[in-house]
Amino acid sequence: MATPSAAPATWTKAEISALKRAVRDTDASMEKQERWRTISQKLATGKTKRECFNKYRELKEIRNKEKAELAEKEAKELENAKEMLNTGAPKGQVETSSVPLSTASPQEDVKQESKPEPEPEPEPEPEPEPE
């Protein structure tokens, strides 16, 4: 068995792929020590069962962190989408427009708004029927 070193073992991409494949293909119900011994033997790279276990744990932590970051990003995007549906602007942003809503001047807008609607003409009353 190799002696533990202070520096972590370096892993190639091929070794990492082989480790993932070996973990996937090795029965998870095996006793822990035997399972990692089997995994390290499948790699045939001289990596110890401890090195294999530590590397797999590191990869798993990285994957979990990436998943959490992705979930957080998606939650923020969903929150912004909901905010845009409610206000028309992303959270924290005020919607401004450099294009006027109307071509009329503000005074004309006020004049137009203050004009009363014309009343509809009353319907003529029907003529009485002759007796």
Image (tube, grey):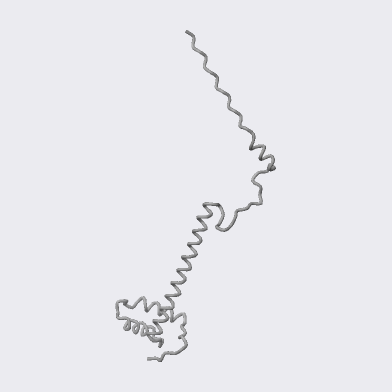
How far from the left and from the top, in percent, is residue 130?
49, 9
Number of numbered callouts drawn:
0
How far from the left and from the top, in percent, is residue 119?
59, 28
Is residue 41 shown left or right of residue 116? Answer: left
How far from the left and from the top, in percent, is residue 36?
35, 82
Q: Nearer the viewer, residue 105 or 9?
A: 105
- The residue shown at (30%, 81%) is 31
- The residue shown at (46%, 85%) is 8
Is residue 60 shown left or right of residue 93? Answer: left
- The residue shown at (55%, 52%) is 88
Up-down relation of residue 41 to residue 24 (above or below): below
Q: Nearer the viewer, residue 15 or 4?
A: 4
Up-down relation of residue 30 to residue 100 (above or below): below
Quadrant including the N terminus: bottom left
Q: Nearer the viewer, residue 100 or 45?
A: 100
- The residue shown at (48%, 62%) is 75
Report which quarter residue 115 is drawn in: top right
